[in-house]
Image (tube, rainbow, N blue to C red):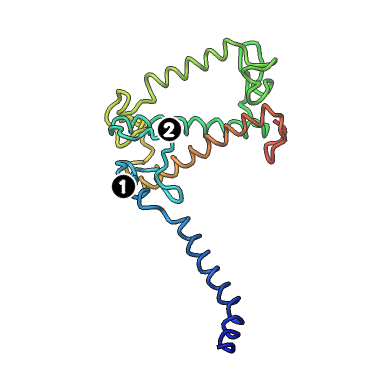
Amino acid sequence: WPAGKEQISSSSPATMMKSILLASAVVGSSAFAPSQQAKTNTALNAYQDELGAQAPIGFWDPLQMTKGASQERFDRLRYVELKHGRISMLAFLGQITTRAGIHLPGSIDASGHSFDSFPNGHAAILGDNAIPIEGICQIGIFIGYLELFVMKDSANGAAPGEFPGDFRNGFLDFGWDKYSDETKLKKRAVELNNGRAAMMGILGLMVHEQLGSNMPIIGQL
């Protein structure tokens, strides 16, 4: 028995270490495994397979805005998300383009002020050398016209389109109908993700502009 005890004692540290490592691996892997409750909740969501529910996050609705929502409500939310994404993509590109020194040629008003004579970013509309209020009003009126009469989809009174955010209205196409259904779905997913990234990007630029940061590529804000 003493010999057996000595043998057990000598092998105990290694055995215990293996047991600890094995237990840690099991616990660690279970921490990252989705719970049965999470699976059940996801399965109950009617929009888990909609466009935009993509890896690695999948369907993500932390505010539960789609919980119990009708298809009409979901389409409206998707329309707003697409619109904000499109505006943000234009805003982000506008920021990096003008800060690179690229501006429209000619004058912005009858007085002969050139486009590049006004500051970039936030200062162009609220700074000391901002665009005159008449010019800002013209921009606002033009955007309002597009919003009310041009950039409309089936969820906002236009002729039925293929999907929320389809602004073709039987006029603009650019060869969209020539694509296969798979390609259309892929392009819509790319636009949606780029719009989401652009919303975060332009928000980040706006914050850093107020902080006066010196950003890579863009330079001093």
* SS for callout 1: helix
Point out the tag, 2 or 1, that comes first from the N-terminus. Answer: 1
**Residue found at x 72% / y 35%:** 214
**Kind of residue at disc 2:** Glu
Residues 134 and 56: in front is 56
Q: Which quadrant is home to the N terminus?
A: bottom right
Could you say where residue 206 lies in the image, as x and y percent from the top left? 61, 29
Classify 10 Å Cα crowding around label 2: few (below 14), some (14-19), many (20 and above).
some
Q: Which quadrant is home to the C terminus?
A: top right
**Kind of residue at disc 1:** Ala
* SS for callout 2: helix
**Residue found at x 32% / y 42%:** 45
Q: Quadrant of residue 121?
A: top right
Residues 161 and 45: in front is 45
Could you say where residue 71 lies in the image, as x and y percent from the top left? 28, 34
**Residue found at x 58% / y 31%:** 94
Image position of 150 with respect to 219: above or below: above
Query: Mark number for residue 219?
Result: none
Residues 8 and 189: in front is 8
Query: Mark number for residue 43?
Result: 1
Could you say where residue 161 lies in the image, as x and y percent from the top left? 29, 33
Label count reads: 2
Classify 10 Å Cα crowding around label 1: few (below 14), some (14-19), many (20 and above).
few
Image position of 2 with respect to 191: above or below: below
Could you say where residue 80 lies in the image, as x and y percent from the top left? 41, 29
Residue assigned mark 2: 81
Nearer the camera: disc 2 or disc 1:
1
Q: Residue furthest front?
A: 1
**Residue found at x 61% / y 26%:** 104
Q: Quadrant of residue 61?
A: top left
